[in-house]
Image (spheres, grey):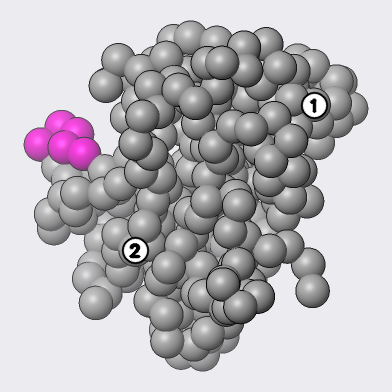
Amino acid sequence: MFYSGRIIDNLLISDKHYLMKVSTPFIQPFIPGQFVMIRAWQGTDPLLPRPFAIYSWEVVGGQNVLQIVYKIVGRGTVILSGLHRGDEVQINGPLGNGFLEPEGAEKFILAGGGIGFSSVFPVALHLKGLGKEMKIILGARTDKDIPPASSVGAKSIEGDVTYTTEDGSMGFRGLVTEVLEKKIEDIGIASREKWAVFACGPAEMLNTVKALSAEKKIRAFLSLENFMACGFGVCLGCVVKVAAPDGYQHVRVCKEGPVFSSDEVIFGD
């Protein structure tokens, strides 16, 4: 069910990213990795709300404040980027399952590719609050695709953080998965049962995480970025294949996901 919120801030924090803060009637408890659907327009152009990972949802200055970080990729996000303080948005959520700590996991590697960092960041804050050990890898094509840490509160996460860019403009030159493979290898095989990988990013990246998980024998959980049209499992626009005893079955990313164990997701046709 949608309810109204009012924009507090809608800040451009990099060439392509915005941090939106919305005052809401109440705080909705959420599991890191869950998402909300947001729309800020009337009529049918565009027709559907847009999905965004919940960045935070807490009391700030006496107000219940939802935060999302989004990247301009199409008409819906262009409209959102033009909103100002006091403008109204419609919100539905939290939705989806989020990242749940698997039984026996005590230590975590968090891998965020592109806008996937906005799903990984609240996981890091949650695990930090639990006193868990973690290694964080955040990557993108260039430094312009990674919002400054100070603009999104990332400096509050202490620990082992590695930045990667494909063009070498920031941190390690290469892919998130290259650093991930090295970090997994640095963990002794005997200790890997205590570790789990949480990843969010493009399908190609997640497919590689899946392969690394199987090869290195470490549990991995993937947050898929399939476009979600309705957000609650009605339109079937986001279905993916997962393994089943007799082959595979289709499931909805918005309803049964967006987080799946890497050994159940089937990428490609």
> Element under label 1?
helix
Picture residue at 62% right of the left edge, 60% below the top: 265
Q: How many marks?
A: 2
| Dot 1 alpha-carbon crowd within 10 angstroms: few under 14, some 14 to 19, many 20 or more | some
What quarter of the picture does the N terminus occupy?
Answer: bottom left
CA separation in Å, label 2 and label 1: 31 Å
Q: Residue at x 58, y 59 (%)?
A: 264
| Residue count near mark 2 (Cα–Cα under 10 Å), binned few <14, some 14–19, many ≥20 | many
The residue under label 1 is which amino acid type?
Glu
Is 196 or 62 nearer to us in this picture? 196
Determine which residue is flagged by label 2. 95
Residue marked by disc 1: 178
Vertical placement of residue 122 versus 86, above or below = above
Picture residue at 13% right of the left edge, 54% below the top: 26
**Relative depth, front residue between 1 and 61:** 1
Q: Name the magenta segment's main secondary structure.
A: strand
Query: Which of marks 1 and 2 precedes in the sequence?
Result: 2
Q: What type is the residue that disc 2 sits on?
A: Leu
Q: Left or right? Give the position of 51 relative to 175.
A: left
- Residue 174 in view of the camera: yes
Q: Residue 5: x percent and y percent?
A: 25, 61
60 in magenta = yes
Q: Which residues are magenta?
A: 58-62
- Residue 26 vs residue 175, the one in the foreground: 175
Q: Secondary structure at mark 2?
A: strand
